[in-house]
Image: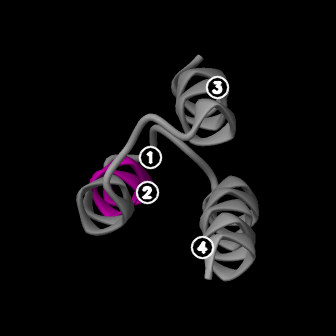
Amino acid sequence: MTYTLCKNIINGGNYEYQSMLTKLDVFLLGNRITSTQYTELSELMDSQQDAGE
């Protein structure tokens, strides 16, 4: 559920990069998302940042 919510927020573009990255770190450390999901979400954020430049 946490993964799905984060992915929806990221896809919607309604987040601040550093704040969301911190949240993903916390979710990973709390075992709310897997390392694979963390990587996917952070790469999705990175690709959106690259597209916005």
Which label was assigned to residue 8? 3
Q: Is residue 15 above or below residue 1?
A: below
Measured Cα–Cα span from mark 1 to mark 3? 19 Å
Q: Are marks 2 and 1 in contact (CB under 8 Å)?
A: yes
Work out whether mark 4 precedes mark 3 in sequence or the reverse, and give the earlier one: 3
The residue identified by callout 1 is 31
SS for callout 1: loop
The amino acid marked with disc number 1 is Asn
Q: Is residue 1 above or below residue 29?
A: above
Which label was assigned to residue 28? 2
* Residue 44 picture location, percent across and down: 73, 62
The amino acid marked with disc number 4 is Gln
Q: Give the position of the C terminus as an image quadrant.
A: bottom right
Q: At 63% across and 70% down in the image, what residue appears?
A: 52
User: Is 26 inside the magenta-drawn segment?
Assistant: yes
Residue that sits furthest to the top in the current view: 1
Measured Cα–Cα span from mark 4 to mark 3? 16 Å
* Residue 3 picture location, percent across and down: 61, 33
Measured Cα–Cα span from mark 2 to mark 3? 17 Å
Work out whether mark 4 precedes mark 1 in sequence or the reverse, and give the earlier one: 1
Q: Depth-wise, is mark 2 or mark 1 nearer the camera?
A: 2
Residue 15 figure quarter = top left
Which label was assigned to residue 49? 4
Work out whether mark 2 precedes mark 3 in sequence or the reverse, and give the earlier one: 3
Q: Which residues are magenta?
A: 23-29
